[in-house]
Image (cartoon, rainbow, N blue to C red):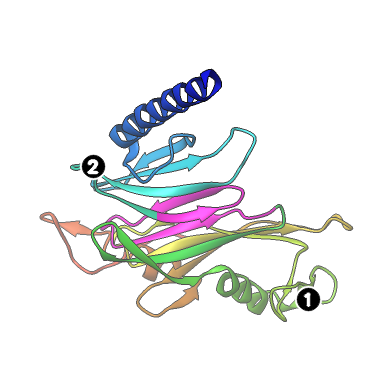
Amino acid sequence: MKRTVNMLYLCGIIAICGLLNASVSKQCYGEDIKPKKYLKKEYTSPEGNIIVRLLGGHPQDNSGDIWLFSAKNPSDRELLYSYERDASVLISPDEKWLVINDRSGTTDTDPLLYKRVKGLKYEEIENLYMKAWELFEKTHKKYKTHVFKRYKRNTILLYGHSYAEAVRWSSDSKSVLIEIYGHHDETPERLEPWYCIYDLTTGKMTLDFNRVFNRDTFHLNGEAKGRELLIST
């Protein structure tokens, strides 16, 4: 009898502690986020309306979740993505688009393009990895025979370690700058950062930096005049 009472008493204490932890978690991050997870990274969108929080598990566990919070109403939140190793988020200036750089392994990184549906809800549109590497392959055909080797993703010839990441949005939110780089384990060949642009209006990668990436950067009387910023060469 005494043992049963002690067990009930212990269960009661555990239940109370659980409620207290849940209350603290709800106040800080929202009721759906488990209190065991800790804040790994946090940044704010360009317009300041969205707070991005990367919440990890144990310090030795690299996996985690990406949550979006409303800056005006912290209780308004949305789980965006769960990653296994590391990730970062790049939100467009108008907050209608974002890219998740998912560093899922030691051999690759995927830039995942998302479009806003409503409020904090975004949906994935496509993975920009292959388009970036396909453009590089198209413009560097002479390297096919000795620099590249066939890779598991597709028939494209890539480095054993090949990465693609979004690094910057254009000011008009209609294009995003992509950086690719890579290397082999067996040979000294490597690719230093090489850049291309994904144009949302065409759905294609391009190297026309001035026409696409500098579009609508020239302003007169506070308004964009639809011209590109000319670059001297």
Tell me where residue 117 appears, x and y as whole percent.
28, 68
Residue type indicated by callout 1: Lys
Residue 204 shown left or right of residue 61 in the figure = left
Residue visible at 50% across and 54% down in the picture? 82
Tell me where residue 78 appears, x and y as whole percent.
33, 53
Residue 126 shown left or right of residue 192 in the figure = left
Q: Which residues are magenta?
A: 80-105
The residue positioned farthest toward the front in the image shown = 1
Residue 1 shown left or right of residue 95 in the figure = right
**Residue 55 inside the magenta-drawn segment:** no
Residue visible at 60% across and 53% down in the picture? 103
Q: SS at mark 2?
A: loop
* Residue that numbered label 1 is attached to: 144
Give yes or no for contact between labels 2 and 1 (Cβ–Cβ under 8 Å).
no
State the CA–CA distance, disc 2 to disc 1.
48 Å
Given residues 173 and 101, the one toward you in this image is 101
Mark carried by residue 71: 2
